[in-house]
Image (cartoon, rainbow, N blue to C red):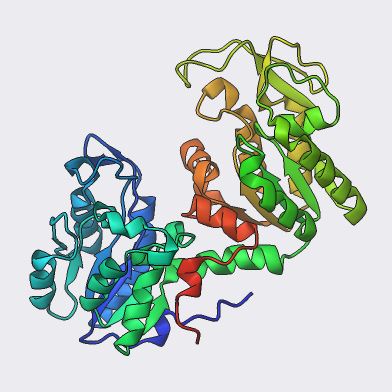
Amino acid sequence: MALNKKSVDDINVAGKRVLVRCDFNVPLKNGEITDETRIVAALPTINKLIKDGGKVILCSHLGKVKNGPNEGESLAPVAKRLAEKLGKPVNFVADYNVTGKDATAAVAAMKDGDVVLLQNTRFRGEEETKPAKAGEAFAKELADLADVYVCDAFGSAHRAHASVAVVTKYISEKGGVNAVGYLMEKEINFLGNAVENPVRPFVAILGGAKVADKLNVINNLLEKCDTLIIGGGMAYTFLKAQGMEVGNSLVDLEKLDYCKEMMDKAKKLGKKLLLPVDTTIAKAFPDPIDGPVDVQVVDADKIPTDMEGLDIGTKTAELFADAVKTAKTVVWNGPMGVFENPTLAKGTIAVAKALAETDATTIIGGGDSAAACNQLGFADKMSHISTGGGASLEFLEGKELPGVVAADDK
């Protein structure tokens, strides 16, 4: 599936002001960045624009910013780390207004190849206003700072926010170009090809807590893949839909009929739908999440009424790993259990290990599965780890992403 959008290779930015929407939504602890994956992922596009002589103006959100602008969600730590990675100064505009006079002055003073980083876009409430009036004024102010716009924030591409999609309208009005960066290209090519043009057998693995979060993904992937594996908390709703006793396991009672429909659909389409055959159970969810927990492994239809399933069992781990061995394309979204707990991470580790050892193209769909791969040390063995959880999911559902749609066609 070709991404028929203008990319940074199709534009000439020499001497021009280039606004680049990045995804610098990095985890922070006491003001220090604990995982720089998203910063590293943005470097190829930024370096290309610097090398081509553009004046590079970067913007991003960080966190959810529920209580208004605050130093705890400032992009200052990102500016510092970015300067180290680029080997050159990054002029950080700390102004909570994002596009105010400080930003205007900083951009006016730029020379070719300079880099400016604006403050957290969500410090402006208008950033997230719903699409109908998605911060038109803020989007226009962002566009006023630049001649060209590049979207390289796949992690935010599913949101029609001012700095992601609306800004393109005002760049176009002034005769500018809207392109995508290398990261966006890579994400769309990997995820797009996996879903629309996979080398078969194509195995999709879905985990995570709720069926409700993955309704459309299950439906869409059943039509595309050869084998669909379901683990994690969402598996217990499927097991209950088959009439099994699942004890105190997480179950979405409103989705039982949907699960039956999906199992019927798999049968009609001749697709394999694999569910856990055994499960790791405990009396209660661990508290704290990584604290000690007593577990036992039982068959999936033998969960006692006062216990709950918190990970797949050993036989299931083998079953899932076997399905992966013969695959040529694997997409994985969502852990197999409570992977944050060492005792309950075994299922997720088994799946990650199977993916690491296969010759297949392996694509990890962001969010918790990406975190699991990073934490468990399997990241460098995967073909592609997506930087966007929600965006990956919507892409796997077959939805169009506003941040992609808004870019100019080739």
Viewer-nearest residue: 293 or 236: 236
Q: Could you say which is closer to the camera, residue 284 or residue 356?
A: 284
Provide residue 13's location: percent of width, then percent of height. 28, 85
Q: Position of residue 289 (x, y in %)?
A: 48, 21
Q: Quadrant of residue 274?
A: top right
Q: Residue at x 52, y 56 (%)?
A: 391
Is residue 282 at least partly visible in the picture?
yes
Above or below, comparing residue 198 to residue 269 in the picture: below
Kindly indicate the quadrant of the structure image that contains residue 231: top right
User: As drawn, which residue projects farthest toward the front?
Assistant: 132
Against 159, is 334 above or below?
Answer: above
Does residue 308 appear left or right of residue 285 in this picture? right
Q: Quadrant of the N terminus?
A: bottom right
Q: Position of residue 59 (x, y in %)?
A: 27, 63
Identified at 66% across, 63% down, the residue is 194
Instruction: State the residue in front, 381 or 254.
Output: 254
Query: Looking at the image, which residue is at 90% across and 48% down?
Result: 267
Q: Is residue 347 left or right of residue 181?
A: right
The foreground one among 310 and 171 is 171
Q: Position of residue 407 (x, y in %)?
A: 45, 77
**Side (left or right) of 32 relative to 102:** right
